[in-house]
Amino acid sequence: MPVVALTDLSIRALKPPAKGQRLYRDKTVRGFGCRVSQGGTKTFVVVAGANRQFVTIGRYPTLSLADARKEARRHLAERTLGKVRPVSVSFEEVQDRFLDACRAKNKPRTVYDYERILKRHFKFGRTPLGNITQHELMRRIYKLSGTPSEQNYAFVTAKIFFRWAKRHNYIEASPLADLPRPAKTHPRERVLTPQEHAVVYQASLAYPYPYGPIVSLLVLTGLRRGEAAALKWDWIDADERMITIPSTETKNKRAHSFPFEDGVAAVFDRVPNLGEQLFPARCAHVRGRPTTHFNGWARAKVKFDAKLEEVAPYTLHDLRRTFDTTMASLEVPLHVSDKLLNHVSGAVSGVRATYNRYSYLPEMRDAIRSYERHLEKICKS
């Protein structure tokens, strides 16, 4: 952390880092400094206490350097005397600081979800953060009882936010501390029937690019929807008929290599070559979030499912579960289906996974052939 003589001139000249945040410590007041984010936001902070806790004072230039130094001296003096009182700021201000902190260490998707939840369900605006009660928070959360998953996510997001606010001395205690989640969630168990499976697959073959081919790939490979949408041409070896998804794109952060057969090859023939991505995004942002590949799931699925009157409601992840269940019905060994699905926990895991480096490629290819023959059969029945 560089030590500089903070002045209005020097603060204006501070350059944002290429990634994350950078703290410039003040020569005048020990523990005081200016933190610059990669987006160019400049925030006054003070570092105090045995655990070197960062306390945000305010943004520059909304808060002047002189006032920030004064507040830093007061805070350090109260720390020395054992008197620490929360900084009185509005919900909106703390929300912005929380999201800035998240952008420096969390994935864009996480930040997007936090921002969406806070701004949709907790519109407290300029209300002082310390005046927001547990009753008022839970009243808003209970309004979401019709959507248990959203209700739980709103509760968890609010709990994370208020815990962060307490840790940064904006409130004395979190109003949601020690409260359990309001809704019970149940594991998804939906597996499509063979008839439903055939209908979805056949509909995907006739449905236009990009959603139709993506659904076809989900049915044929058991991939997660994000993995299928993120596919790039250089991950595909057409000669060896192999796909390799790098660890940066998989849920478990392990590279995933698996074979494909005629069904997948036919899907690739339907996909136009528009550049690096098989399914590039039509615009650079979806709902304000940066993206490079297809991400318009909700609207596309509604239109697609409107043609599937004989199929009960399902999620795209149910296609992955159906793939796995079908493999079991075809008597594919568990360790082979686990390899096809890139499961970490399974028949080959723990110490065995460390020493067993066999790829099971012939077995995976046989399983895929059996699976495609099964799809062809149920489509004809």
Image (tube, grey):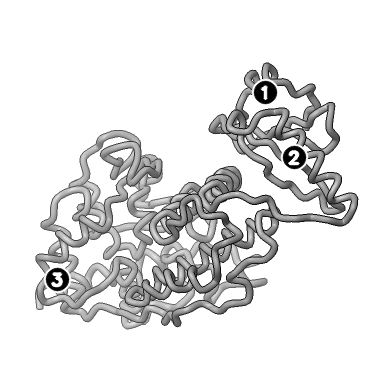
Secondary structure at badge 1 equals helix
State how far apart marks 2 and 3 are (Cα): 66 Å
Residue nearest the viewer, comparing 323 with 364:
323
Question: On the picture, is 207 further left or further right than 65?
Answer: left
Screen quadrant of the C terminus: bottom left
The label number, if any, that marks residue 199 in the structure image: 3
In the picture, the disc for residue 104 is none
Q: Amino acid at mark 1?
A: Ile
Q: Quadrant of residue 371?
A: bottom left
Q: Nearer the viewer, residue 138 or 109?
A: 138
The residue wearing badge 1 is: 11
Residue 238 in percent (x, y) is at 32, 46
Mark 3 element type = helix
Q: Earlier in the sequence, mark 1 or mark 3?
A: 1
* CA distance separating discs 1 and 3: 62 Å
Q: Residues within 10 Å of mark 1 (few under 14, many from 20)?
A: some
What residue would you read off at disc 2?
71
Q: Nearer the viewer, mark 1 or mark 2?
A: 2
Q: Earlier in the sequence, mark 2 or mark 3?
A: 2
Q: Amino acid at mark 3?
A: Val
| Residue at x 54%, y 63% (from the top left corner) | 132
Which residue is the extreme one toward the right? 81
